[in-house]
Image (spheres, rainbow, N blue to C red):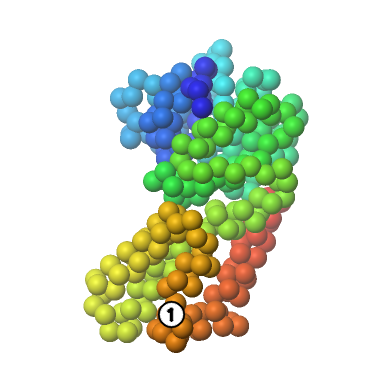
Amino acid sequence: MAALSRPLLLVGCGKMGGAMLSGWCESGIAEAGVTVVEPLGAPNFAGRADVAVIADAANIADGFDPQVVVFAVKPQQMDSVAPHYARFTAPGTVFLSIAAGRTIAYFEDKLGPEAAIVRAMPNAPAAVGRGITVAAANGQVTGQQKSRCDGLLGTVGDVAWIDDEGLMDAVTAVSGSGPAYVFLLAESLAEAGREAGLPVELSDQLARATVAGAGELLHQSGDSATRLRENVASPGGTTAAALEVLMGGDGWQALMAKAVAAAVKRSRELAG
């Protein structure tokens, strides 16, 4: 993607906003400059000539004309934040939100029905450039604006687009919340190792390296997760014995389905 020709406005610079900003700076996409609105400041970007940090939307100079406005604040803060940016609603500006649960209709209400809005759901591995983001756009978003948002999101991982915004609740439950499920797996595997008699440090090391290594193998391999699992499990072996438990009627598959359903339900509740 070519660099933006006008400034980018980032509202919120916490973990996810900061990860995205790092990606933009490294890629050169935002060479026209980024203005960050963050009351707590952005010390990791201090001294950069292409990043200006201000504490409040009221400090944005008159005449400022951003090409993209990115909302990266917590969903519960959005009611008090979004209306301050309605003044930037114009055909040449697109709003990109990564706030979980906040719908396109929500932003159309806050910014005006003519606002070009992209709703996106990234996930935690964006912090190391290995995230995945799913995005949906309203009818005001042009092809060029969609391409710009795709490029911005793509600096921290893969990007997929959907036409049905209603799928975002399931996306949130699978990929948005999904890293926590994987971290829980590592926790549980380490605890099980300790219960089996392994020293604490060794058990933690084995669980961490195993989960990370298996994830990288899945990433690099052209095989499906099913095939990779089958490759590890020899008939009648130790892995097969463990999988018989994990894949039983009340095992992982049933639990994961219940967990994702609970996250979908909560996502819908947050969206109102």
- Count of number-bearing discs: 1
**Residue at left 41%, top 30%?**
27
Q: Quadrant of residue 85?
A: top right
**Residue 94 in view here:** no
Q: Position of residue 251 (x, y in %)?
A: 55, 79
Pick the residue in front: 113 or 230.
Answer: 230
Q: Position of residue 20 (x, y in %)?
A: 45, 37
**Residue 20 in view here:** yes
The local secondary structure at tag 1 comes to loop
Q: Position of residue 19 (x, y in %)?
A: 42, 40
Vertical placement of residue 241 versus 218, above or below: below
Identified by mark 1, the residue type is Ser
Q: Position of residue 175 (x, y in %)?
A: 55, 55
Pick the residue in front: 155 or 66.
Answer: 155
Q: Which residue is mark 1?
A: 234
Q: Residues within 10 Å of mark 1 (few under 14, many from 20)?
A: few
In the drawing, does residue 195 fall left or right of residue 162?
Answer: left
Pick the residue in front: 114 or 213.
Answer: 213
Quick one: which residue is furthest to the top in this view? 63
**Residue at left 68%, top 36%?**
137
**Residue at left 57%, top 32%?**
149
In the drawing, does residue 103 fall left or right of residue 39?
Answer: right
**Residue at left 40%, top 57%?**
216
Q: Quadrant of residue 268?
A: bottom right
